[in-house]
Image: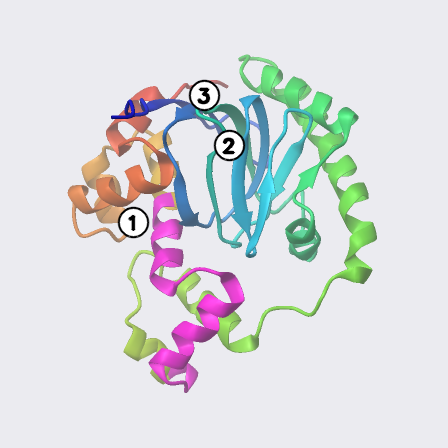
């Protein structure tokens, strides 16, 4: 009988006092795979050991050590170790002030950026983000990273294909408005004047993820922010639309790799 692969889940997360950064997330995983999910922020990712394989917009990608990966908000992706040894990654989640929505399509077309200068700058940004009192250095490094990213992405805009279907976009906007309260499919169909099945097909076809998966991803994203603020998991569950703490834990562990309590306890308070 083959030996069972061990599972390692080590995470550290914090929210620095740096404008534009919503979260810093360092992790090492083996034997764990992220399911399809979305973020409401830009994901700037470097892998220090191993490699990650992932699907974005129905295309497979990878993250060799010399690559900077930029995943745009609201676009479904997954992720898993490319080797049995797993991977160690550092992630910065960025709000929309550094990169505009007009760059989402260009990032989808080429999320893995082989740019040595950018890779070096992102590594130095993480060093600055981890040190209390170095917020100005982190802001300066982030400004240069944003400039570099925009320079790499904007030449692609003219080649970008047409945008998402209007019906799928309308449903996504409804879901974004009701992350905590939720939205019944029948109500969405009535509001958008579409058959429920057609609505699900349109959304899944446009984004590669079902509406309920998208909603749960958005709720987990909000839960991460509250947990980093020190809010207990039970209160976080109630504030983000989960039925109870067990419901939050099930989806949080699936999408983040650890339980809400462990994630909250691992948080570093820098800045």
Q: Earlier in the sequence, mark 3 or mark 1?
A: 3
Magenta span contains residue 197: yes
* Mark 2 crowd level (few <14, some 14–19, many ≥20, 10 Å Cα): some
Q: Mark 1 points at which residue?
A: 240
> Which picture quadrant has residue 258?
top left
* Mark 1 crowd level (few <14, some 14–19, many ≥20, 10 Å Cα): many
Query: SS for tag 3?
Result: loop
Where residue 82 appears, as percent x and y from the top left, is: 51, 32
Q: Mark 2 points at which residue?
A: 82
Name the residue at 38% across, 50% down. 217
Between the residue at mark 1 and the residue at mark 2, the CA separation in whole angstroms equals: 33 Å
Instruction: Give the side of residue 239 with respect to residue 31, left or right.
Output: left
Query: SS for tag 2?
Result: loop
Q: Earlier in the sequence, mark 1 or mark 2?
A: 2
Nearer the viewer's eye, disc 1 or disc 2? Answer: 2
Q: Which residue lies furthest to the front in this view?
A: 1
Chain part drawn in magenta: 191-220
């Amino acid at each position: 009988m083959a030996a069972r692969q061990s599972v390692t889940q080590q995470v550290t997360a914090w929210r620095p006092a740096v404008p534009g950064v919503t979260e810093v997330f360092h992790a090492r995983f083996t034997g764990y795979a992220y399911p399809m999910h979305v973020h409401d922020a830009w994901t700037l990712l470097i892998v220090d050991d191993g490699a990650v394989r992932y699907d974005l917009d129905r295309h497979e990608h990878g993250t060799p050590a010399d690559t900077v990966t930029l995943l745009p908000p609201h676009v479904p992706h997954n992720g898993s170790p490319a080797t049995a040894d797993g991977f160690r990654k550092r992630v910065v989640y960025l709000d929309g002030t550094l990169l505009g929505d007009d760059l989402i399509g260009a990032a989808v077309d080429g999320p893995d950026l082989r740019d040595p200068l950018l890779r070096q700058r992102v590594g130095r940004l993480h060093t600055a983000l981890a040190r209390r009192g170095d917020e100005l250095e982190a802001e300066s490094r982030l400004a240069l990273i944003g400039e570099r990213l925009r320079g790499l992405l904007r030449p692609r805009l003219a080649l970008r294909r047409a945008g998402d279907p209007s019906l799928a976009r309308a449903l996504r906007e409804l879901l974004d408005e009701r992350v905590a309260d939720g939205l019944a499919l029948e109500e969405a169909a009535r509001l958008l004047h579409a058959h429920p099945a057609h609505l699900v097909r349109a959304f899944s076809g446009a984004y590669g993820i079902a509406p309920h998966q998208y909603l749960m991803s958005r709720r987990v994203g909000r839960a991460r922010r509250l947990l980093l603020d020190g809010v207990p998991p039970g209160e976080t569950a109630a504030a983000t639309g989960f039925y109870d703490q067990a419901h939050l834990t099930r989806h949080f562990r699936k999408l983040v790799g650890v339980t809400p309590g462990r994630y909250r306890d691992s948080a570093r308070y820098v800045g």
